[in-house]
């Protein structure tokens, strides 16, 4: 089933790690990068590995680990440590080009063999949040079969741009971030990956979160990053198709199945439907886990 809600948990916070399984998120991302001070990197690795080992096979959520980027001196040690805990996937921040994913894929293959993990099963997820990564984003779609999802980020991107803010006076993201977000959606669907929407930074504003989720789902995103536990339930709700939507999707699929000679168009409820409607119906059932 596709994960709708993702939340980062600092790898060096015993308190937050102890509560992670009860948050209700579909995916937990143990963070070794931005959420962890430089001096605490070794501690975070050890704690993340212990958490993965403890919850192997009994986690309420997918267990990912956000490692440090290739531009740091930490990524190899991160991978060596956490792969012993058999994570669901590795979250790679700040990729520069498709080669980063190919290199990570190779590292993971070696470490999977070393840790008795079926080669190729550890997933990769990433976020486009740098100027160089945005330039090469089109390469990501075919960089590695492990790459299963991507999201976009405006905070690190703003810093990379040297910008003092990332939104205008009306609260709308500047055009550069809108383009980055749109590219993320296009690249993900070109590469048969999950497109995950970025954060709603005003975590106390539920109305804003609901509006962002509604628009993101309408555009084609199938999940969203939460920055606070209070956002998880809303994200799960907003990205879950209703029973009415599921029922209609099944009727669309059945209408095409019943059509003579594999017709390219069918009639349903007084409307003419073609193959894009069929594709949309199948994707909705996949999102709902109701195929």
Image (cartoon, grey):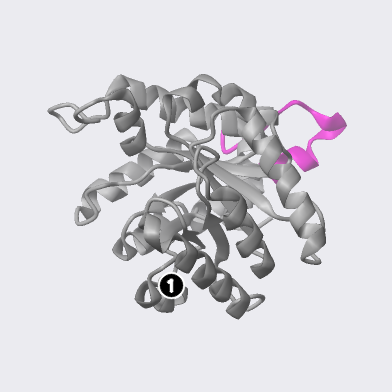
Quarter placement of the N terminus: bottom right
Q: Residue at x 67, y 62 (%)?
A: 83
Left or right placement of residue 78 versus residue 129 in this view:
right
The residue carrying mark 1 is: 20
Dot 1: what SS? helix
Let me know if residue 1 appears in the view: no
Q: Nearer the viewer, residue 221 or 122?
A: 122
Image coords of residue 21 (percent x, y): 47, 75
Q: Quadrant of residue 160?
A: top left
Q: Nearer the viewer, residue 272 or 35?
A: 35
Quarter placement of the C terminus: bottom right
Left or right placement of residue 201 versus residue 251 in this view:
left
Q: Residue at x 52, y 45 (%)?
A: 73
Q: Looking at the image, is 248 positioned above or below residue 174? A: below
Magenta region: which residues? 252-270
Let me know if residue 226 appears in the view: yes
Image coords of residue 59 (percent x, y): 58, 74
Left or right placement of residue 268 versus residue 131 in this view:
right
Q: Residue at x 15, y 29 (%)?
A: 170
Q: Looking at the image, is 132 positioned above or below residue 189? A: above
Q: Residue at x 58, y 28 (%)?
A: 187
Please rate how many residues cluster around mark 1, counting C-alpha atoms within 10 Å: few if below 14, some from 14 to 19, many from 20. Answer: many
* Numbered circles on residues, count: 1
Image coords of residue 276 (percent x, y): 64, 29
Residue reaching furthest to the left: 169
Q: Nearer the viewer, residue 176 or 244?
A: 176
Residue reaching furthest to the right: 261
Q: Is residue 132 magenta?
A: no
């Amino acid at each position: 089933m596709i994960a709708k809600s993702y939340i980062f948990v600092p790898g060096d916070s015993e308190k937050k790690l102890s509560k992670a399984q009860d948050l209700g998120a579909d995916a937990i991302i143990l963070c070794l990068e931005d959420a962890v001070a430089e001096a605490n990197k070794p501690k975070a690795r050890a704690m993340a590995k212990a958490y993965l080992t403890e919850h192997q096979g009994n986690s309420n959520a997918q267990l990912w680990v956000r490692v440090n980027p290739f531009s740091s001196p930490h990524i190899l040690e991160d991978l060596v440590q956490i792969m012993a805990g058999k994570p669901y996937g590795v979250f790679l921040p700040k990729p520069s080009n498709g080669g980063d994913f190919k290199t990570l894929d190779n590292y993971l293959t070696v470490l999977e063999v070393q840790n008795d993990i079926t080669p190729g099963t550890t997933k990769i997820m990433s976020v486009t949040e740098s100027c160089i990564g945005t330039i090469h984003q089109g390469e990501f779609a075919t960089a590695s079969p492990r790459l299963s999802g991507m999201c976009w980020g405006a905070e690190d991107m703003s810093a990379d741009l040297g910008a003092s803010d990332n939104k205008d006076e009306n609260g709308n993201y500047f055009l550069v971030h809108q383009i980055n977000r749109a590219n993320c959606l296009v690249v993900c669907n070109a590469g048969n990956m999950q497109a995950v929407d970025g954060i709603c930074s005003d975590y106390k504003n539920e109305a804003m979160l609901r509006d962002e989720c509604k628009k993101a789902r309408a555009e084609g995103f199938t999940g969203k990053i939460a920055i606070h536990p209070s956002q998880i339930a809303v994200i799960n709700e907003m990205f879950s198709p209703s029973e009415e939507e599921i029922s209609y999707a099944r009727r669309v699929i059945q209408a095409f199945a019943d059509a003579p000679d594999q017709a390219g168009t069918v009639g349903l409820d007084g409307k003419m439907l073609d193959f894009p409607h069929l594709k949309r119906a199948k994707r909705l059932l996949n999102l709902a886990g109701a195929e």
